[in-house]
Image: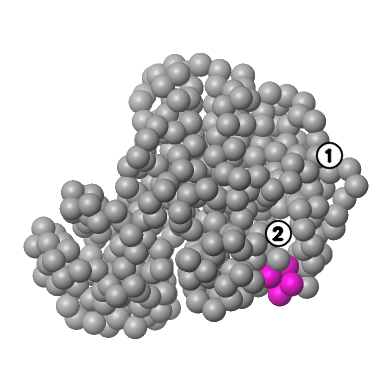
């Protein structure tokens, strides 16, 4: 059985791309480097022995003479710095047209159509904002009016926040589906609609990560995931993977509420201990001997990058590292493990948005030649090619 395990450490970029200024970023941005510096180094012995420190100078991540993995720096081909663009390119799609952004909020005609079709009565905000800040600011008004809080960012997102003790979660999801339909049919070219549920806990609004849902635009072309699925293989999405690909090319999916849960589920998947039938799109279906396990670890981005929390970001990377040893130990001879990222989100530079960065890629297999730096390579889609060749 040939398997590929792709783990995306969301937003763990390693340096600005040459066109970063076109995306509103400064040439100094480097998510991992600055997180390492802020924390006076990171304790990541497994990433270290795989060769992460050999890619450049990261404080506290040593260069090793005989790394156990093959590693490289990937430069994005697509025009974008968002989750969808990054993951799609990892799976084989490159985009010449960047997704649309709305620095002044969404057009009146779009909002009016949303209000009419959802029958929500009205909306609050309609501007770029930090999610935690806008919820704290408008929570009282939200409770008075029951209007959803609509906001965006420098990324291509239409975000809808509600207190689910006030507005049922099912209603929030329905409103997101309606927004996705409007945005698609009217060709606004918005990458994602995001459901942002929250609750009042100890007197403060707190977002509920496990109930977040992303409603992505459908992939513009078939991906590697579609190829493997169409050939009769399994494609298991862990975390928000099924949302990013709008379920296209996925055979099994399970959402997560934290990186820890995502890591534990990935380990279970590698050990063949997931409740496969419970998370399958099609019940009682048989599959061939090809399999992709595709995991998104979102906490680095969602909880720490966007909140300028370099300390929390470092802790999250260290937590991921603690799972790599058991993951490696449980890999079979025909397994390929790939660890990478999808963009940057440097918590130490001005702003709270994604940063246009190169990303690391680390490849390990018990039968793959190691101890090799492939250098800087153009295209996240090299990952799709490597996995295709492996399977």
Residue depicted at x 26% and y 77%: 125
- Magenta span includes 191: no
Give percent across and percent down for residue 52: 75, 52
The C terminus lies in quadrant:
top right
Circle 2 is placed at which residue position? 318
Q: What is the span of residues highlighted in magenta in the rendered image? A: 34-39
Residue depicted at x 84% and y 43%: 67
Q: Is residue 389 visible?
A: yes
Give percent across and percent down for residue 133: 40, 79
Question: In the image shown, does 52 or 165 lie closer to the viewer?
Answer: 52
Question: In the image shown, does 67 or 208 lie closer to the viewer?
Answer: 67
**Helix, strand or loop at mark 2:** helix
Question: In the image shown, does 179 or 316 lie closer to the viewer?
Answer: 179
Q: Is residue 117 left or right of residue 360?
A: left
The N terminus lies in quadrant:
top right
Whole-angstrom CA distance, mark 2 to mark 1, is 23 Å
**Helix, strand or loop at mark 1:** loop
């Amino acid at each position: 059985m040939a398997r590929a395990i792709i783990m995306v450490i969301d937003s763990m970029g390693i340096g600005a791309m040459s066109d970063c200024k076109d995306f509103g970023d400064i040439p100094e941005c480097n998510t991992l480097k600055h997180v390492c510096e802020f924390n006076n180094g990171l304790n990541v012995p497994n990433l270290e022995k795989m060769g992460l420190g050999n890619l450049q100078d990261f404080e506290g991540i040593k260069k090793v003479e005989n790394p156990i993995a093959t590693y490289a720096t990937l430069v994005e081909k697509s025009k974008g710095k968002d989750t969808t663009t990054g993951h799609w390119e990892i799976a084989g799609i490159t985009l010449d047209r960047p997704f649309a952004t709305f620095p002044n909020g969404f057009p009146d005609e779009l909002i009016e159509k949303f209000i009419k079709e959802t029958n929500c009565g009205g909306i609050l905000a309609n501007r770029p904002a930090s999610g935690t800040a806008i919820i704290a600011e408008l929570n009282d008004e939200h409770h008075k009016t029951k209007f959803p809080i609509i906001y965006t960012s420098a990324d291509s997102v239409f975000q809808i926040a509600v207190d689910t003790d006030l507005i049922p979660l099912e209603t929030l999801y329905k409103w997101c589906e309606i927004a996705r339909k409007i945005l698609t049919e009217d060709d606004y070219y918005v990458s994602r609609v995001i459901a942002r549920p929250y609750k009042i806990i100890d007197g403060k609004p707190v977002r509920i990560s496990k109930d977040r849902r992303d409603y992505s635009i459908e992939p513009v072309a078939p991906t590697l995931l579609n190829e493997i699925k169409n050939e009769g293989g399994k494609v298991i999405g862990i975390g928000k993977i099924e949302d990013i690909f709008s379920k296209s090319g996925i055979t099994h999916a399970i959402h997560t509420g934290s990186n820890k849960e995502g890591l534990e589920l990935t380990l279970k998947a590698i050990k063949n201990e997931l409740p496969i039938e419970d998370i399958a799109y099609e019940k009682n279906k048989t599959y061939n001997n090809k399999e992709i396990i595709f995991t998104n670890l979102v906490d680095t981005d969602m909880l720490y990058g966007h909140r300028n929390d370099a300390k929390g970001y470092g802790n999250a990377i260290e937590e991921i590292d603690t799972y790599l040893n058991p993951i490696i130990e449980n890999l079979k001879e025909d397994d390929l493990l790939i660890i990478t990222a999808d963009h940057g989100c440097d918590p130490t530079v001005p702003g709270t948005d994604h940063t246009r960065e190169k990303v690391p890629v680390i490849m390990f297999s018990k039968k793959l030649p190691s101890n090799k730096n492939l250098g800087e390579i153009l295209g996240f889609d090299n990952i799709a090619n490597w996995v295709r060749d492996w399977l």
